[in-house]
Image (cartoon, grey):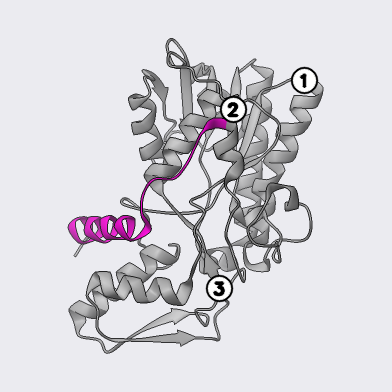
């Protein structure tokens, strides 16, 4: 039975860490659409959420009833390989201290955003939540994945001991307008889009991509993800983790060919097999989110890519 709450946000104060970021900006928009009026976004320039004193100062200012914890140090394979200690420490310390302080202050609900990187490297496809603990994550992003996974352990422990209402979700790879297109830190879709558009403009005959193109991935349009997060905040109060995805699977090779077609790039794709592939396959069982709170992704993948490409063309710095 899904609990619908049309007046859920009335008189509730919500704090959204990471609310100024890619996903966060869409979550803020969805919160407004759902009726939230009292939203506090702690900016990175004002708060270092690794520091306990900054966390306490943020809570003093925000006085939240609900915390949606989106803030994270995140990036693609290259960024994870270059800074594994940072990806572990910063994400772990932010999450653990934010949740602990929320419990101490009697916050009504804590919404923890995990990561698909928490799953074991060789998880059977489609990934089901009960397989989360059946092995070690893929090596290139394991420090990040495990740091985010500890939020699930903490949420369940605090629920068991303190009856604290913390929920935990596992979003798949996101994409869409406003994404990070920095080639040093971006994920695969924005990196491919930028490479193809720049190669097209410079008349380059080939684009070099990482790995061999064989891995598969699932992608979720950022606006769908934001809707899922807000719906879960309103309607789900259980201890079990749940996947947040689209239920589709595409190979990196097919993705690259789709992006070249949509950007109009006519050159060759060259695969640099000296670079890692990452996890061999990724695709989610998304039935829990639908069962628990009625979420189903809506954006067709090709249309989402087209919107992302259009946004990048209009907003990039020349």
- Marks 1 and 2, how far apart in space? 18 Å
Magenta-highlighted residues: 293-316
Which SS class for mark 1? Answer: helix
Q: Earlier in the sequence, mark 1 or mark 2?
A: 1
State how far apart marks 1 and 3 are (Cα).
Answer: 42 Å
Identify which residue, 39 or 227, lies in the foreground: 227
- Mark toward the viewer: 1 or 2: 2
Where is mark 2, residue-wise? 236
Callout 1 crowding tier (Cα within 10 Å): few <14, some 14–19, many ≥20:
few
**Disc assigned to residue 162:** 1
**Is 238 on the left-hand or right-hand side of 76?**
right
On screen, residue 146 above or below 255: above
- Residue at 52% across / 83% down in the picture? 212
**Do tag 1 and tag 2 residues touch (Cβ < 8 Å)?**
no
Mark 3 lies on residue? 215
Q: Is residue 176 above or below residue 92?
A: below
Looking at the image, tell me whether mark 3 or mark 2 is earlier in sequence order.
Answer: 3
Assign the magenta stretch its main secondary structure.
Answer: helix
Q: Position of residue 1 (x, y in %)?
A: 60, 24
Give the label, 1 or 3, closer to the camera: 3
Q: State the residue in front, 221 or 57.
A: 221
Q: Is residue 304 magenta?
A: yes
């Amino acid at each position: 039975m899904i609990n619908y709450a049309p007046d859920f946000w009335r008189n509730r104060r919500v704090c959204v860490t990471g609310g100024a970021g890619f996903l966060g900006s869409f979550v803020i928009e969805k919160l407004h659409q759902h009726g939230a009026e009292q939203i506090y976004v702690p900016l990175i320039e004002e708060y270092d959420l690794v520091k306990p004193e900054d966390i306490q100062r943020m809570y003093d200012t925000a006085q939240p009833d609900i915390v949606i914890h989106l803030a994270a140090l995140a990036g693609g394979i290259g960024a994870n390989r270059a800074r594994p200690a940072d990806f572990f420490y910063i994400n772990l310390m932010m999450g653990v201290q934010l949740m602990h302080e929320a419990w101490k202050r009697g916050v009504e609900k804590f919404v923890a955003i995990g990561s698909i990187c928490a799953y074991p490297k060789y998880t059977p496809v489609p990934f089901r939540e009960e397989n989360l603990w059946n092995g070690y994550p893929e090596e290139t992003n394991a420090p990040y994945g495990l740091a985010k996974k500890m939020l699930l352990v903490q949420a369940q422990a605090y629920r068991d001991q303190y009856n604290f209402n913390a929920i935990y979700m596992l979003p798949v790879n996101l994409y869409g307008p406003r994404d990070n297109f920095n080639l040093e830190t971006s994920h695969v879709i924005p990196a491919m889009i930028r490479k193809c558009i720049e190669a097209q403009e410079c008349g380059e005959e080939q684009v070099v991509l990482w790995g061999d193109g064989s891995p598969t991935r699932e992608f979720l349009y950022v606006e769908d993800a934001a809707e899922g997060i807000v719906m879960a905040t309103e309607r789900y109060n259980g201890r079990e983790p749940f996947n947040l995805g689209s239920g589709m699977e595409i190979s990196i090779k097919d993705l690259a060919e789709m992006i070249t077609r949509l950007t109009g790039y006519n050159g060759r794709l060259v695969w640099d097999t000296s670079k890692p592939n990452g996890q061999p396959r990724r695709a989610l069982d998304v039935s829990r989110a639908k069962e628990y709170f009625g979420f189903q992704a809506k954006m067709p993948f090709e249309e989402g890519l087209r919107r992302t490409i259009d946004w990048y063309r209009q907003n990039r710095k020349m």
